[in-house]
Amino acid sequence: MYGSLHEFVEKLDAAGELKRIRTAVDPVLEITTIADQEMKAPSGGQALLFENCRGAKFPLLINAYGSHRRIALALGVPDVATIAKELHGILTAKPPASFKEALALLGTAMDLRHTKPSTGKVCAATEELPGLSALPIQQCWPKDAGRFLTLPMVITRDPDTGARNVGMYRMQVIDERTTFLHWQLHKTGARHWRRYCELQKRMPVTVALGGDPVLAFCATAPLPDGIDEFMLAGYLRKKSVELAKCQTNDLEVPANSDFVLEGYVDPQEPLAMEGPFGDHTGYYTLPEPYPKFHIERITARCDAIYPSTIVGIPPMEDFYIGSASVQIFLPVFKMTFPEIVDIALPAEGVFHNLVVVSIRKQFPYHAMKVMHGLWGMGQMMFTKMIVVVDEDVNVHDTREVLFRLCANIDPQRDLIFSKGPADVLDHATPVVGFGSKLGIDATHKLSGEANCRTWPPLIQMDATGAKAAG
């Protein structure tokens, strides 16, 4: 739990995870060049704090989530597996059979009380800024259309239910008080906006930057529509997220935010072409029409640090964010698919292009049941390829996965094709937002599966040989 992004920076520094850069650096291309090299260093390199950004008033922090250790530091745990184990315990809790078990369950319930955000606090971001040029907003790649905010927490509400959503959508700067909002077709923010268009009502939007690093992590989490990301943040930080009322609209923002941008989207204003923008696919996203965000008020705290990231050819910082999300939510997947042992999203698959899942195979065509089930779960609908392997395979070991993939499949028998929603940033699909899927069954085959001969055993040393070698 951190009271500000500044506190997190001090923690990174004390842990030897921070590199301070005091020489003047240009946010246009130069910061990206340095950060890209650091992100591709062994184990993700170090977080970088650019203390002197040309033309801007505030320092810039990047690669703060760019290693397994820094993700754990951001979430306040020794290891992300700690959270997954705790969540598994909550999801599988049984009625207590003894006083000791009752006390343990009470402790779990006390932890959950932190999920509900608290309100009424005063926002720490109180210094008013004249415009966006005070922030060291980057242009990341040469063919980008301009500068973009890359780690914004975009806060909206469903006009019918009042349910809050906190999403992370890139924001191309148009002028001092205007940006685009690149909320993609399938995102909750876009659904809220479509409803405001139907109602012909101005849509209030507030954007928070910085604060406790757990907040930005939760804005990227694959939560179901209607589940408040600030509730997840409260659970992870073991303390309710303290919210403050905005000055120009009826939304609320984390009180410890470093920057707050309050404004609106006008549903009667025509869309305009946003982009191109270098993206997590490793390619440029071509221009597409998106709405404009009009900023009425910009505030900053006195010790504000501007949080940023870059996306591009992997591995990048977003790989570690995605890996942590998969690890934390694996117990949720197992509630629906108890046969799942582990899931991996290799860096080369840029999040959801490739998913490798290991299962305890119990019946013929079990792997295909898992494939179709995963394609139907939330953001897994964007996954282009799912490879299913046996439970004894380490899905995080690419060499081991490729060995089973090559050894255990007959292409005609073990490959299935399907169709469904696709990432709108995927340039390879025949149309925007829709494409084909590939499932590969790389498990051992059972009697009853078509065109399958007797399956041979895997070569393994027995106890006698192991003893002799020892």
Image (tube, rainbow, N blue to C red):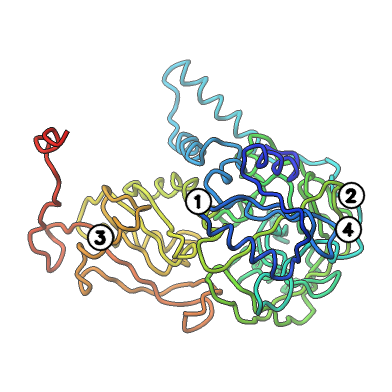
> Spatial distance from mark 3 to mark 1, Cα to Cα?
24 Å
Q: Residue 403 carries which label?
A: 3
Front of the two marks 1 and 2: 1
Judge the density around disc 3: few (<14), some (14-19), many (≥20) Cα neighbours within 10 Å: few
> Spatial distance from mark 4 to mark 3, Cα to Cα?
58 Å
The residue positioned 50% from the left and 83% from the top of the image is: 431
Mark toward the start of the polypeptide (1 vs 4) = 1
- Apparent side of residue 99 relative to residue 156 in the rendered image (left or right): left
Q: How far across and down, in percent of the image, does residue 355 sit?
A: 40, 61
Q: Mark 3 belongs to which amino acid? A: Phe
Q: Mark 1 belongs to which amino acid? A: Ser
The residue positioned 59% from the left and 57% from the top of the image is: 38
Q: How far across and down, in percent of the image, does residue 211 sit?
A: 74, 47
Q: Mark 2 belongs to which amino acid? A: Thr
Q: Residue 43 carries which label?
A: 1
The residue positioned 46% from the left and 21% from the top of the image is: 101
> Spatial distance from mark 1 to mark 2, Cα to Cα?
37 Å
Q: Residue 126 carries which label?
A: 2
Mark 1 and mark 4 residues within 8 Å of each other at the beta carbon: no
